[in-house]
Image (cartoon, helix red, strand yellow):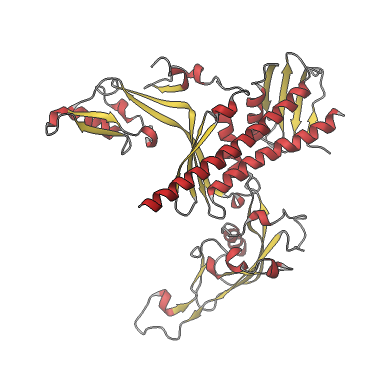
Amino acid sequence: MEGNRKSRVILEEYSIPNASEYTQQDWNLLNFKKEFKIQVVRESEDERELEFDLIGYPVGFANAFRRILLSEVPTMAIEKVYIVNNTSVIQDEVLAHRLGLIPLRADPRLFEYPSNKDEDEISDQDSLRYELKVSCTWNPQAPKDSRRTNDIYRNSNVYSKDIKWVPIGHQEELYPRGAEQLGVLEKDILICKMRPGQEIHLFMHAVKGIGKDHAKFSPVATASYRLLPDIQLIKSVRGEMADRLKNCFSVGVIEVIETKPGDLDSREARVKNPRYDSCSRNVFQHEDLKGCVQLSRIQNHIIFTIESVGTLPSSVLFVEAVKILKGKCKTFLEELENIGK
Amino acid sequence: MGRLAEVASEQSSEKCKTFVFMDEGYTLGNSLVAVITQNPDVEFCACFVNHPAEGNIYVRIQAKTGKAIDILRKGLQDLDKICDHTLETFNNAYEQFKTSKDMCVDST
C-alpha cells in the first residue's frame, strides 16, 4: 500500500490527506518517451465516440488537448444568411441563428479560412453556398376526416434535409459527389414550422471557423477527461452488508460472490471493475461500511473521452488537436528567431 | 508585427524575462510552463493573464544559469517533441485497437 500511495489521490470522507503529494509532477523530459502511453479503450460504431487512456501524462497536457478540441479545431458552419423571403412566424435573426447551428458534413481540411470576413464576395476555396426554399401549401389529396398536420398540409415542417448545396466557382468539378459530401450532417433537424401561405427562401454561406469565435464551429459535442478511480476493500464485507456496499457504487463496480456455493451467508463483496464508477461517495452514508473501503484515483492515468458532432471521427479530431498544439510551438519558435536577432 | 514580445521593465535581465504570447491562452501557457519547470536550469516559471479582454498570455521565466530566451526556446522544442510522441503513440494505439477489433469480428 505505502509503495504506490504516491501515485494515488486518496479520497476520504472530508479530506484528501495526500493533496500536497499529488500536485507534484513526477515526470521529466528524459523519460517521457518511455512513460507516456496511450491505450484506446472504446469506440462507438459510427466512430463518433472515442474513449482512450493517457497513461503517465501530466494532467496539464490532457487539459490542453481538451481545450483545443473544444475551441480551436476548425469546422465549417453557416456564417451568413441572405433572406429573400421569410413569411414564417420565426423572425429573420432567430432563423439565421438556428441555421448557423446546423452541423455540416463538409471536411474543413479541404477549405481555407475566409480571407476577408466583411466582404460579400466569396471564393470556391473558402466558402460553401446553400439554398433553402420551402413554401407550405394545403394538401389537395388530404384524407377527408384527418386533422393531422402532416396530412392536411404540405411542407408544414421544414427540416435540415431541405437545405440544398449550391456549387460555386469550380466546386462542381472539384466535388462530383458534393451533395452528399458537403450537405448537412443530420437530415431530421426541425428548423421551423409553417402553415399554408407561408414561405421561406434564403441563401446561406458557410465558412471555416473555430469554436473560440462561435460555439457552432466546435467539432465536438463534448470532450472531457477524468482520473481512473480505484477502490480497495480494506476489510472483507459479507452478507447483507455486501449488498448494501454494491448499491453504493455504479452498476458493475462491485460484485457479490458466494464463497461457498448455495450458502447465502457466505456472500462476500469483491471489487470487479472500478473504471466506470461515478465516484459518488455514497458509501460514506453508511457508518458501518465507510471503514471498509478506500476510495482513490490514480494520478497518472487519465481517461479521455471525445464525442464528435460527426463531421470528422473522434480519432481524427484528437490527431488534429495535437497537430494544432504542435503548430503553436512551431509558430513561436519562428517568432523567437526574430526576437533573438 | 510578431506574436511574441518581451515585457520591458526594470526586473528584466538576460536571466529573468517576461514574454508575451499574443492571441494565446492557458492552452499553450499552462502546458508550456509544465514543460519549462522540468528544466533543471529554471528557478521559476509561471504564466498569467493580465486582463481577460486582452487575449494575451504572459510567461515569466527566471533562470538559475543561462539565458531566459534559451530556456523558452528549449521549452517550445520539448513541447513540440511531446506532441510528436503523442501523435505517434496515439496512431499506434488506434491502429492496434482497430486490428484487434477486426480480429474479434472475424472470429465470431
Viewer-proximal residue, A340 or B86?
B86
Q: Position of residue B29 (x, y in %)?
A: 67, 31
Residue under the point 54% across and 65% down = A160
- The answer to whether residue A156 is above or below residue B76 is below
- Residue A290 locus on image (x, y percent): 29, 22
Say which quadrant the C terminus of chain A sits in.
top right
- Is A162 situated left or right of B6 in this image? left
Instruction: Tell me the quarter of the picture where residue A241 sits.
Output: top left
As rendered, which of A233 and B107 lies closer to the eye? B107
Residue situated furthest right in the rendering: A341
Query: Measuring 60% from the left and 68% from the top, which residue is drawn there?
Result: A179
Seen at 38% across and 17% down, the residue is: A1
Position in image of residue A297 (x %, y %) = 43, 27
Residue B55 visible? The answer is no
Residue A133: image quadrant is bottom right
Please say if A171 is above or below A12: below
